Image (cartoon, rainbow, N blue to C red):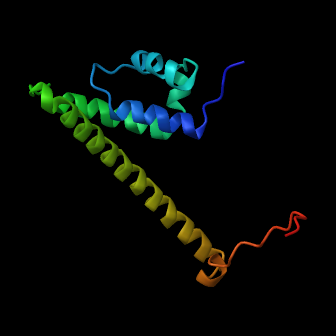
Amino acid sequence: MAKHITDYDVERIVEILDGWRDKLTWKALCDACSPVIGTKPSRQTLLKFSRITMAYDVCKIRLKEHAPVCTPPSMRVAVERINRLEQENERLKRENLGLLQQFVVWQYNTCARGLSEHDLNKALPSIDRGKTD
């Protein structure tokens, strides 16, 4: 039976895409995932996760826009790190925008059902699991 991809695996795959430098194909990504998550996922499996498909699309755009840059060997590590962090930042901005849009939908639905801000800010109930101090 195939291993299910967890949220942790999705995060690791997205990190792979943040640092991707070569020609990007779904097959190459599936091959790169194998040592990281312990199994080789199919393209269809990866397509089920919106974070992965969004990161894939952003990576494809980045690779088209940025031609290889000649840098001195001493600067190569720093340039790669900066590029990876910039790509991660761009991906996180897109994810944040998606979460903000989801929040607006939730906000509308709570108002439509008559929930107040006070109701939404109530503390979670404490759980008594029979532990003694």
Camera-side residue: 131 or 47?
A: 131
| Left or right position of 83 against 97 | left
Residue 39 point in image, percent of width and height: 58, 19
Vertical placement of residue 52 versus 94, above or below: above
Quadrant in which residue 78 is drawn: top left
Quadrant in which residue 24 is drawn: top left
Quadrant in which residue 26 is drawn: top left
Q: Residue sitting at 41 percent across and 35 percent down?
A: 15
- In the picture as drawn, the residue positioned furthest to the front comes out as 133
| Left or right position of 83 against 111 | left
Residue 75 point in image, percent of width and height: 14, 32
Q: Residue sitting at 32 percent across and 31 percent down?
A: 19
Vertical placement of residue 60 versus 108, above or below: above
Count of marks overlaid on the render: 0
| Left or right position of 80 against 15 | left
- In the picture as drawn, the residue positioned furthest to the right comes out as 130
| Left or right position of 59 against 44 | left
Q: Residue sitting at 47 percent across and 57 percent down?
A: 99
Q: Residue sitting at 50 percent across and 64 percent down?
A: 103
Residue 55 point in image, percent of width and height: 38, 37
Residue 8 point in image, percent of width and height: 56, 38
